[in-house]
Image (cartoon, helix red, strand yellow):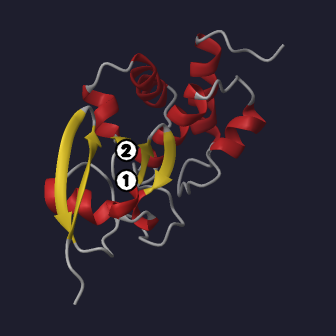
Amino acid sequence: MSKDIQVSFTLNGKPVTYTVAPHTSLLRMLRNNYNYDVKCGCEEGDCGTCTVLVNGESMKSCITLAAQVEGANIVTTKGLTYGTDEIGHMIQRAFVECGSIQCGFCTPGMVMAAKEYIDDGGIADRKAIRKAISGNLCRCTGYVKIVDAIYRVAKDLGREVR
């Protein structure tokens, strides 16, 4: 039997520490210990709905071990919603205004992938946006409205393709 481990990190701006089994995924740690807003989808790394930002990089929490985030800064969609990150708020507003949210299954992962793309200097380029969200599956929008929302944010930030 393996010994439990302690994992300390920053979650949506607040320091936290959890004690978990070494094989515990980041998804399970967040959902079981804090009931955080990380959505559970396939738990195999395919759908992307459980995506969170770890040190600014989008990661699928279902295939990330909890131990891998020791000392990291993690942001979930709740961190974007209730935080002070204006770009996060812009992305969420654009998703609503562009009709990018239908069933809601993919929304958290898509928002987090969009956040990484925009934070990394992403431009209003539909092909680049499609590539940035390619690790996330959408079951009902056909991706067009999602791409439209991210495109709008990039354009509103003055990042138009020249």
Secondary structure of the residue carrying numbered label 2: loop
Q: What residue type is labelled 2?
A: Ala
Per the model, the C-alpha gap separating discs 2 and 1 is: 5 Å
Q: In which quarter of the image is residue 66?
A: bottom left
From the viewer's perspective, is residue 57 above or below residue 26? above
From the viewer's perspective, is residue 90 above or below residue 81? above
Marks 2 and 1: CB-CB under 8 Å?
yes
Mark 1 lies on residue: 69
122 displayed left or right of 75: right
> Relative to the observer, which residue lies in front, 35 or 100?
35
89 displayed left or right of 19: right
Q: Quadrant of residue 123?
A: top right
Residue drawn at point x = 58 percent, y = 27 percent: 118
Give the x, y percent position of residue 115.
Answer: 50, 32
Q: Quadrant of the N terminus?
A: bottom left
In the displayed image of the protein, which residue is found farthest to the bottom?
A: 1
Give the x, y percent position of residue 131.
Answer: 71, 45
> Which numbered disc covers residue 83?
none
Secondary structure of the residue carrying numbered label 1: helix
Q: How crowded is mark 1: few (under 14 residues within 10 Å), some or many (20 or more)?
A: some
Give the x, y percent position of residue 63.
Answer: 45, 67
Residue drawn at point x = 60 percent, y = 33 percent: 117
Q: Quadrant of the C terminus?
A: top right
Residue drawn at point x = 75 percent, y = 28 percent: 125
Residue drawn at point x = 63 percent, y = 35 percent: 147
Q: Which amino acid does label 1 sit on?
A: Val
Number of labels in the image equals 2
> Relative to the observer, which residue lies in front, 153 or 61?
61
Mark 2 lies on residue: 72
Give the x, y percent position of residue 48.
Answer: 49, 57
75 displayed left or right of 34: right
